[in-house]
Image: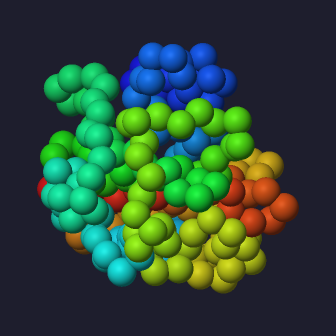
């Protein structure tokens, strides 16, 4: 239900329907999710970097990340266990979301921003020194399909231009890692990286 609401809100913003109200821009949802397919073996979605700022998933709150970046608007949707909080930033030609679940940043979304996408005060421009966004020091917009597979192995699931990589590590307290990408012309045009550990 929550994901459906996020898709609707993001669609409204991208279409320009909510520009006048300057509403929060919720992180979009990928069109596929990994399931019970054979998981990947190579560890991934452990950390991300914003320029020289290196952060591990599940190690920081949004408040802490915002403090280190120097600005941003924390938005919220839902309540209790169904709540999602996020920060949204604009980069040249792209948009970044950092999402917090249960008190820690566990998900990053990075996508090419269409020219028609409206600006919003809820997605301020990210300072230039933080604009190089990478997952595990390597994966970012423009990464090729061949490079992804070389690093991570074959995707656990594939549907058209969508690839889903999935890994579970029970020895680490039921650690669940997911990386979903959408390709355009064989290169990453959008990515969703997520790490959730249940102890």
Relative to 188, does residue 71 appear above or below in the rendering?
above
Left or right, residue 158 beside residue 69:
right
| Quarter containing the N terminus | top left
Q: Position of residue 159 (x, y in %)?
A: 74, 48
Would residue 45 be found to the left or right of residue 142 on screen? Answer: left
Note whether 174 is above or below 78 in the view shown: below
Image height of 166 relative to 113, above or below: below
Identity of the residue furthest to the right in this view: 185
In this rendering, does residue 180 appear at all? Answer: no
Q: Quadrant of residue 16?
A: top right
> In terms of depth relative to the viewer, which is nearer, 25 or 99?
25
Identify which residue is drawn at 53% across, 57% down.
91
| Colouring method of the image | rainbow
Say whether residue 199 is visible: yes
The answer to whether 112 appears left or right of 81 in the picture is right
In percent of width and height, residue 188 lies at 68, 62
x then y, percent, for residue 52:
36, 80
x 41%, y 46%: residue: 124
Residue 8 occupies which quadrant of the picture? top right
Q: Residue at x 51, y 17 (%)?
A: 20
**At which x and y percent is residue 176?**
36, 58
Front in this rendered view, residue 160 or 112? 112
**Is 184 placed left or right of 150 in the picture?**
right
Number of residue marks: 0
Along the line of sight, which residue is nearer the eye, 8 or 162? 8
Quadrant (top left/top right/bottom left/bottom right) for the C terminus: bottom left
Tell me: residue 151, above or below residue 11: below
């Amino acid at each position: 239900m929550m994901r459906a609401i996020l898709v609707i809100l993001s669609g409204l913003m991208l279409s320009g329907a909510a520009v006048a109200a300057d509403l929060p821009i919720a992180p979009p949802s990928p069109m596929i999710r990994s399931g019970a397919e054979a998981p990947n073996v190579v560890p991934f979605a452990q950390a991300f970097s914003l320029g020289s700022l290196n952060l591990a998933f599940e190690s920081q709150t949004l408040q802490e990340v915002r403090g280190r970046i120097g600005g941003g608007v924390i938005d919220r949707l839902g309540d209790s266990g169904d709540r999602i909080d996020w920060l949204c930033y604009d980069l040249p030609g792209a948009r970044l979301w950092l999402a917090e679940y249960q008190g820690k940043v566990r998900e990053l979304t990075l996508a090419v921003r269409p020219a028609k996408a409206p600006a919003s005060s809820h997605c301020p421009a990210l300072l230039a020194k933080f604009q190089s966004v990478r997952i595990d020091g390597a994966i970012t917009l423009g990464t090729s399909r061949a490079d992804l597979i070389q690093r991570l192995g074959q995707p656990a699931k594939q549907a058209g231009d969508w690839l889903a990589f999935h890994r579970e590590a029970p020895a680490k307290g039921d650690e669940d890692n997911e990386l979903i990408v959408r390709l355009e012309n064989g290169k990453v045009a959008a990515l969703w990286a997520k790490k959730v550990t249940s102890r």
